[in-house]
Image (cartoon, helix red, strand yellow):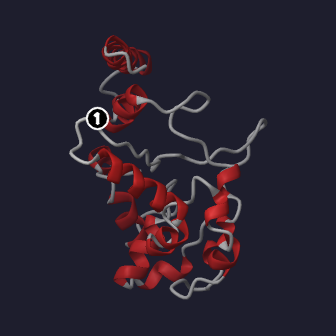
């Protein structure tokens, strides 16, 4: 890879792939959806695949997991809760509007999911997204094998693990030192949330 990957933002891998400068991205479907939206000619030749197999099981990246909450200090808690119940209960519409980016927490709310992704009129070919028909079986939440929580989310969002790999890969730190720095950061985050009673 080229040195600029150490300064990428969340959309950089999309544009590297669509510009023909990359041949593989471990990513959500934003690469192909961005290509379809902006009519990149290469988009029709970019395919999706399941997570790579492993001795125990292949696990996809759960990097775009949504968690919905109603804050205690919200001005209208009752309507907020009703909104979430309605949103989840009618997720079929959200699934379509989100163009398959967000799969349902409750699969029964999108009973025709397989049919929808097997024939997407925006994709070339229309069955490009059919590979995702069992994605919920091979994608894990942030924090897997445990649960998502505030500490896991902060560690993910601050990029501590990305920085660790970048420091080791660039030679700025030894792999051992980069691991120690990331571990210290993660422990500090966990201690903060633990002190607040959230972990």
How many numbered marks, from 0 up?
1
Residue 176's place in the image compared with 94, above or below, is above
Q: Nearer the viewer, residue 8 or 108?
A: 108
Residue 186's place in the image compared with 35, above or below, is above
Q: Residue beneath label 1, please?
A: 72
- Which residue is at 26% across, 46% downward? 7
Q: As drawn, is 52 to the left or to the right of 122?
A: right
Residue 81 point in image, percent of width and height: 39, 49
Task: Specify whether residue 170 is in view.
Answer: no
Identify the residue at the far front of this view: 78
- Which residue is at 62% across, 29% downward? 145
Task: Specify whether residue 118 is in view.
Answer: yes
Q: Please tell me whether mark 1 sits on a helix, a strand or a loop.
A: loop
Q: As drawn, is 166 to the left or to the right of 64?
A: left
- Which residue is at 59% across, 71% downward? 47
Residue 135 point in image, percent of width and height: 65, 57
Q: As drawn, is 164 to the left or to the right of 59?
A: left
Residue 162's place in the image compared with 175, above or below, is below
- Which residue is at 41% across, 54% downward? 82
Task: Say few, some or many: other residues with alpha carbon within 10 Å of mark 1 (under 14 / 14 to 19 / 20 or more).
Answer: few
Q: As drawn, is 122 to the left or to the right of 71?
A: right
Q: Nearer the viewer, residue 128 or 20?
A: 128
Q: Which of 70 and 143 is in front in this view?
A: 70
Residue 174 point in image, percent of width and height: 39, 19
Q: Quadrant of the C terminus?
A: top left
Residue 146 point in image, percent of width and height: 58, 27
Q: Nearer the viewer, residue 56 or 188?
A: 188
């Amino acid at each position: 890879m080229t040195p600029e990957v150490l300064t990428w933002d969340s959309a950089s891998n999309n544009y590297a792939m669509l510009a023909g400068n990359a041949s593989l991205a471990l990513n959500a479907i934003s690469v192909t959806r961005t290509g379809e939206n902006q009519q990149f000619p290469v988009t029709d030749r970019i395919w999706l695949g399941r997570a790579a197999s492993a001795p125990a099981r292949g696990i996809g990246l759960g990097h775009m997991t949504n968690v919905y909450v109603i804050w205690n200090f919200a001005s209208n808690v009752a309507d907020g809760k009703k909104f979430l119940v309605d949103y989840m209960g009618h997720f079929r519409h959200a699934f379509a509007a989100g163009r398959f980016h967000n799969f349902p927490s409750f699969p029964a709310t999108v009973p025709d999911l397989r049919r929808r992704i097997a024939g997407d009129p925006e994709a070339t070919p229309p069955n490009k997204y059919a590979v995702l028909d069992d994605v919920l079986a091979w994608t894990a939440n942030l924090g897997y094998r445990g649960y998502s929580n505030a500490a896991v989310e902060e560690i993910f969002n601050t990029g501590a693990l990305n920085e660790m790999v970048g420091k080791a890969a660039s030679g700025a730190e030894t792999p051992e030192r980069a691991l120690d720095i990331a571990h210290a950061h993660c422990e500090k985050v966990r201690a903060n949330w633990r002190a607040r009673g959230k972990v």
